[in-house]
Amino acid sequence: MISGTGVGAILAAMLSADDGTGHPLFTAREAVKFITLNNSRLFRVNKLSGVLHRRKKFSGKSMDKVLKEMFRREDGTVLTLKDTCKPLLVPCFDLNSSAPFVFSRADASGSPSFNFELWKVCRATSATPSLFKPFRLSSIDGKTSCYAVDGGLVMNNPTAAAVTHVLHNKRDFPSVNGVEDLMVLSLGNGPSCGRSKVGSNGECSTSSVVDIVLDGVSETVDQMLGNAFCWNRTDYVRIQANGLGNGRMRMEEVLKERGVESLPFGGKRLLTETNGNRIESFVQRLVASGKTSLPPSPCKESAVSP
């Protein structure tokens, strides 16, 4: 299955959206190219944001338009969570209930009350406060609603949620009995700005505290999963910029960096393998294991049956 928040969720949805033939609507290369070419439209600066401070930095209407184009088939069909060829899980935070809200194909296939249009799901998990307004959406039948902000605020590393979902979803994963049956690749987006969290006077600014919270949530998940897979760490790979450099890093630079791995009782160790080598090794093991060829999902079959 694939999971993500923010732009990660958009990529996850693009790679799992069904083109109508049981294949993904986008290949990985096509998805990255599409987002790169449309980045200025996805994050179009609101010209009034600097004049009227109540205005958000980016235009929600511009992002809405791109996402609608993205998740519409050539025949005009608007795709929903149920219209995916692989299990998908996307979290956001619901301001109505003050709790996380997790969108999943399993729930969408089980009831129209949990089936949402894919573009709206991606819009919901991308609604970062101060950048976009909260996004209101309803299920296909109108019975379930959510007033969403960015899922990354509470689940910026959704790997644990994805693993838990698989372990408790026997309809989609009937042969999974425990973590020993899983292979997990977790891709981070780097530590917050790579800057020191403590100022020269020894105090933390408000923005630094926010960074600590967000990085802490992500690192805690990594620590927990590292412990869960400690018996065979090759089945769990976390790719994250190691934070030893200054500022933001390009993807090529992250791939050339030596990998970092969480230790069972806290702390991290620097590996001899580069992140690129770790991904390559993981893919080879995944293909060799045959775990890429899951049996047809009963949940998906029921979703597409007349």
Image: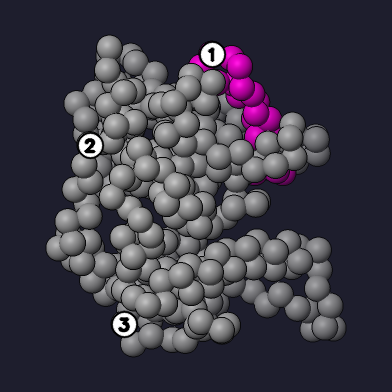
Alpha carbon distance from label 1 to label 2: 27 Å
Magenta span contains residue 144? yes
Q: Nearer the viewer, residue 305 or 120?
A: 305
The C terminus: image quadrant = top left
- The percent position of residue 123, horizontal first and vertical second, equals 54, 33
Question: Which residue occupies 51% across, 17% down?
Answer: 140
- The percent position of residue 91, horizontal first and vertical second, equals 55, 43
Label 1 sits on residue: 141
Pointer 3 local density, CA inside 10 Å: few below 14, some 14–19, many at least 20: few
**Mark 1–mark 2 contact, CB under 8 Å?**
no
Question: Which residue occupies 58% across, 34% down?
Answer: 124
Magenta span contains residue 157? no
SS of the residue at dot 3?
strand
Alpha carbon distance from label 3 to label 1: 50 Å
Residue 273 is marked as 3
User: Which circle's residue, 1 or 2, is located before the other in the chain?
Assistant: 1
SS of the residue at dot 2?
loop
Choose mark 3 or mark 1, whichever is in front: 1
Q: Nearer the viewer, residue 93 or 131?
A: 93
Q: Quadrant of residue 256?
A: bottom left
- Does the rendering let one see residue 253? no
